Amino acid sequence: MGKQFPAVSGYNQIPNGYFVPEIWSGNMLKNFYEQAIASEICNHDYEGEIKDKGDKVIIRRDPEVEIRAYQKGKRLEMQNVSDDAIEFPIQRGVYFNFPVDDVDRRQSDVPWIQKVTNNASIKIKNYIDATLFADVYGHVATGNQFKNNVTLSATATDSNGIPSFLTSVMVMLDENHCPNDGGRFLIVTPAIKGLIMQNSVVNNAMHMGDKQSMLRTGYLGTFDGLKIYVTTNLYAANTYTYVLAGHTAAITFATQITKTEKLRNPNTFGDIIRGLQVFDWKVVQPTLLCYGTVKTS
């Protein structure tokens, strides 16, 4: 191994000096990251208002009007119509912060600062996915569970089979008056994806998305208006995964601050690279969400 430029004890090289061309000859190991899908299954209806007007927005609900049967001569009853509102504050944030030594920058022949910040942005997206999926199930409307502790099998033709699994999702969405306008989604694990791909009936009926979309968002395809996404970030407990389904109108997401900046390091010759993302989400239509606890055999 070649020599590194000397550093004080305890100072981590970038990392361990391995960005120096003598070590890697310009080739860097590529990490494969989970595809972020939160932005695909949420709406961003109020993001502009939050960015422009403060740290929260008041979401007004349409008033509910009562419908009554009519007969000739019947005295009409009057309904006092009132509005309702949901407060959507921004209360979550995540950041990164690392030093860049001038010597290491000079001796490196790859744009590693860009690579490291790209790495950080992908990690942030995955952090958001995981925290959203860990939180959202507590906001699903009571009773909206389409499967309970079911073991899915590639060969099953009963309730443990993939067609029955997908049908139960669509039936529950229909029963909750979920619009079938292209906004319906289902999020599954890679193992469930494998079962879907093995089922010829379902696989033939799915309209696959273009390659770029699948790479960017984890999008698998569409089955009867249901967009199917794949992730490893779904919440799991007691060997069962909480598979999530719903409509993009159910969850609203907003990012208020996304910033990356560089400043000189006051303690050495070099820079500090740091980034911040402030964000949050809100379940505004809990009846448009449902879930199932499943595993695969």
Image (cartoon, rainbow, N blue to C red):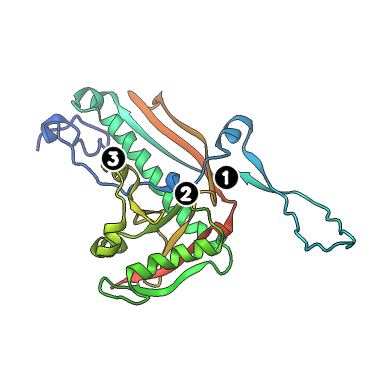
Contact (Cβ within 8 Å) of mark 3 with mark 1: no
Q: CA distance from mark 1 to mark 2?
A: 26 Å
Q: Determine which residue is flagged by label 1.
A: 91
Residue type, label 2: Gly
* Residue shown at the point (56%, 69%) measured from the top left: 143
> Residue 265's image quarter?
top left
25 to the left or right of 232: left
Q: Determine which residue is flagged by label 2.
A: 183
Q: Which mark is residue 212?
A: 3
Residue type, label 3: Gln
* Residue shown at the point (13%, 35%) measured from the top left: 24
Pick the front one: 86 or 274: 86
Q: Looking at the image, can residue 240 be seen? A: no
Q: CA distance from mark 3 to mark 1?
A: 32 Å
Q: Quadrant of the C terminus?
A: bottom left
Pick the front one: 128 or 170: 170
Nearer to us of marks 1 and 2 is 2
Q: Quadrant of the N terminus?
A: top left
* Residue shown at the point (78%, 63%) measured from the top left: 69
* Residue shown at the point (34%, 60%) measured from the top left: 189
Task: Tell me which label, 1 or 2, sits earlier in the chain.
Answer: 1
Task: Tell me which label, 3 or 1, sits earlier in the chain.
Answer: 1
Above or below residue 155? Residue 72 is above
Q: Which mark is residue 289?
A: none
203 to the left or right of 246: left
Above or below residue 268? Residue 141 is below
Q: Kindly give the residue lying farthest to the left in the view shown.
A: 1
Label 1 neighbour load within 10 Å: few <14, some 14-19, many 20+: few
Above or below residue 203? Residue 182 is above
Residue type, label 1: Gln
Mark 3: which secondary structure?
helix
